Amino acid sequence: MTKNKGFQYYRTIIVATLIIIPILTLLYYIMEILITMTPMPPDTVLKCESFVEFDEVALRNYRERRELSVDTFSVPTSCQALKKRNYFPVEPKNPTEVDWPLLYVKIVTKNYLFIEKALAMNYSPYNQYCFVLDSKAAPIFKTQMRNLSACLINVHVLEDEFSFGPQGQRIPNAHMQCLTKMKNFDWKYAIFASGHALPLHTNGYIIAVTKKLRGSSHLDVYWAENNREHLYQQGRWSMAELKIFREAYDLHLYTRTLQMARGCADVILSRMFADYVLRKLNLTSLMDVLNRGQYANEFFWATVATDPTINVGVVSTVTL
């Protein structure tokens, strides 16, 4: 009798286990699906006091979509609030940052908080950061960016704003103005990136990569004959018409025609390249002509870097 009771006891445990385990497994997968499908708030701990001054519409949108829009919410941009949200080191993370400062150039139009976070991700007190504002940006965004510049001495926001076109118009002008503003600062390479580019590498890694360039610049270039013909029809492209050179070194250079090239707008320019452009070249007419057409930002640096007559020096190009 005792043996039967013991057998029944263990049988009950085994049966219960066989029933409970599938149920728990099913519940686990259901919870995983619910967690995956349910939008989560941006922070693990939601600070309710930050919503005190937010309007009712913004709060309702946040409850429904769990999205924070910087254009909707007034993010505090005092120096104290800025440094409370982010870590901006005052000492270099890597000794190489001291001897190899970089310049970052970005054109920004919206999403201040994203830009702030992206800046903090690869910030170095020895780097320089130049931001250009789109004149069509919201007033609150412009104020936030200028407050950011006021808090960090190596973050610069150009006084001039540009009305950028949908096909890259006036981006070359903004790039040139940033280079002009930053010409008296110490930096080894200028990195031009889109406003919403997210840094995928540390500042130390980028330093190591630019050191391997050994003074050359890096651009992605591809030769599009149909685009060239389209541009050539828009105006005269001789060196004399464009007045590319500030001084007449060789008169025969003025009889040559600029060879157009197209490439990625995100480029890495060496200090030697930038100094040559600022001292020797006058690119105003070239920018004016490009701004009348399409993809001015893609033609500008690719053309300046690869034209044999301009001859800016060593350029590392990836032909696409």
Image (cartoon, grey):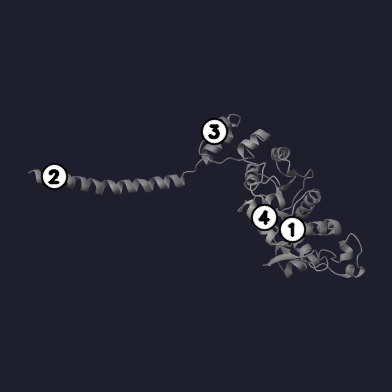
Q: Give coordinates of residue 99: x percent, y percent.
A: 72, 52
Does the rendering let one see residue 75?
no
Q: Is residue 103 above or below residue 217?
A: above
Q: Give the amino acid at mark 4.
A: Ile
Look at the image and tell me whether residue 59 can be seen. yes
- Name the residue type under label 1: Leu
Q: Which residue bears the numbered disc 4?
A: 207
Report whether 231 appears left or right of 11.
right
Which residue: 21% across, 48% down? Answer: 14
Q: Earlier in the sequence, mark 1 or mark 3?
A: 3
Q: Between marks 2 and 1, how big is the CA–CA gap?
A: 82 Å
- 191 vs 21, nearest the viewer: 191
* Of labels 3 and 2, the one closer to you: 2
The percent coordinates of residue 153 (x first, y second) are 73, 41
**Is the residue marked by circle 3 packed among few (<14), some (14-19), or many (20+) residues within 10 Å?**
few
Tell me the element at label 3. loop
- Decide if residue 8 is on the left or right side of residue 251: left
Residue 296 or 247: which is nearer the viewer? 247
How many labels, in total? 4
Disc with the residue nearer the chain's start (2 vs 1): 2
Q: Are marks 1 and 3 in contact (CB under 8 Å)?
A: no
Residue for badge 1? 269
Residue 130, placed above or below residue 266: above
Q: Position of residue 215 (x, y in %)?
A: 74, 61
**Mark 4 vs 3: CB contact within 8 A:** no
**Front one among 129 and 90:** 90
Which amino acid, mark 3? Answer: Lys
Q: What residue does disc 2 label?
A: 6
Kindly identify the residue that appears in the image at 73 percent across and 38 percent down. 150
C-alpha gap between disc 2 and disc 4 = 72 Å
Q: Which residue is mark 3?
A: 47
Q: Secondary structure at mark 4?
A: helix
